[in-house]
Amino acid sequence: MRSLLILLLVAAAPAAAQVRLSARAGITGSTAMVKDQILEDIEVVPALAPTLTIGASLQVNPKVRADLELAYATSTAEVEEDGDQTGDLGSVGTLAYTLGLSGPIVSRLAWRLSLGGLTYLPSEEQGIFRDGGHTTLLFGAGLDWRQPLSDAWAIVAGFRYDYHTFTTDALDAQGFTQSQQVQRIGLSLGAAWDMP
Amino acid sequence: MNRRHLSLTVLLGAGLACSDMATPARDEPYEWRLVVGTDTLSFHWPREMLPVRVWVEDSLDMPAHVEHGIGIWRDAFLYGEYDAVLVGDSADADVLVRVLTPPPKAVATAARVLASFPGCGGATDIDTTTTRFELQLPVRMYVFPKFDPALVDLSECFDITATHEIGHSLGIFRHTGDPADMMYSDPEASGLSERDRQTAEVLSHYPPNMVPVR
């Protein structure tokens, strides 16, 4: 990951003047992290998570920007039995760190593809998190809409989809095999600043 | 599509092709329910009562042994079905743990499950007598030494006894016939067997026909 970032920065060095910083706030929704059956269907599903995203991007050629994005989301890991919430496992944060490429689709709308990592940060070591969280690969895609306010400032809105697989040491220890496929969708709104 | 795009597509495709998490094969639980007359009674703590409040007599380091037992059972669950905390006021407790030989039962018809160990013993009274479908709180547990604890190290015995009795308090109202189980009548195992864990999981999702009352 670090090598890739260095490569991106080196490649973008001639265009250092085109560094763009952004910060956005939004929400992220997720599919179930765990699906099980003990007499009835059980799922562990994160509640809608307030999300803070910061990013930095560089123009690497006239049509493509490379970026680094960090997104932190936190919500309650809800336990659902037969579709009804019956409890929770406390709050769980997720930190996504991705390297991406983006480019224009139409004038203010841009695509983004990303690859990186995602770390689950449970607040309490209990249940499926009793032996700690989980770190996994993260694949993502998204759309960004950018409305300039001035030469340097713009309002940005983002849509993100990402995919990862989930398991924990506690689940492994209790005989769960393979991992749960998890998909997330996020919406966010914020500001971007082009460095002079 | 160039090679870079092809690689990314293959990588994403491989990820998406993974099947979902496979639920582990689980053994049959052992019988945990209490039979009173013609009634088969099942209980687990309602979620809204968690964490269960446990008062422990401060003698022979028993609070630490009970906390040890609570931790073992808490870790048996994946979905937060059980938790307990020690409280300082016995009037607020759902479970009382005394360090003494069990006295005559407070209610003569309450069920008492006794366990015997080489160095110590334990008992839990389950009072269902009001309507049979109510569990009278607090649940009363007893842990006691059989020898002078000043002469013999009973720490391990107290750990096992406390864990066993906590097992009763969370709803396992029977003993098993397998010495490998924590809930064997004369347990030797220092930790839970797979059957203990799976029984605890199942009972916590089994519809209870007893409700706790004060």
Image (tube, helix red, strand yellow):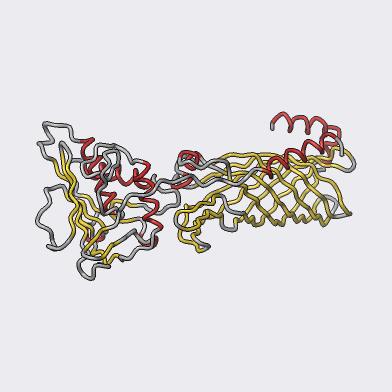
Q: In the picture, which quadrant includes the N terminus of chain A?
A: top right
Q: Image point 29% across, 53% down: which residue?
A: B172
Q: With respect to residue B43, does B146 lie above or below? A: above
Q: Image point 65% across, 39% down: which residue?
A: A137
Left or right: residue A127 compared with residue B160: right
**Image location (x, y in percent) of residue B17:** 68, 44
Q: In the picture, which quadrant includes the C terminus of chain A?
A: top right
**Along the viewing direction, whichever of B87 and A170 lies nearer the viewer:** A170
**Image location (x, y in percent) of residue B128:** 22, 64
Q: Is residue A106 visible?
A: yes
**Image location (x, y in percent) of residue B68:** 30, 42
**Along the viewing direction, whichever of B178 and A123 lies nearer the viewer:** B178
Q: Image point 57% across, 41% down: which residue?
A: A178
Left or right: residue A14 compared with residue B194: right
The part of the image, by quadrant, that contains residue B210 is bottom left
**What residue occupies the far bottom of the structure in this picture?**
B131
Q: Is residue A149 visible?
A: no
Q: With respect to residue B38, does B118 lie above or below? A: above
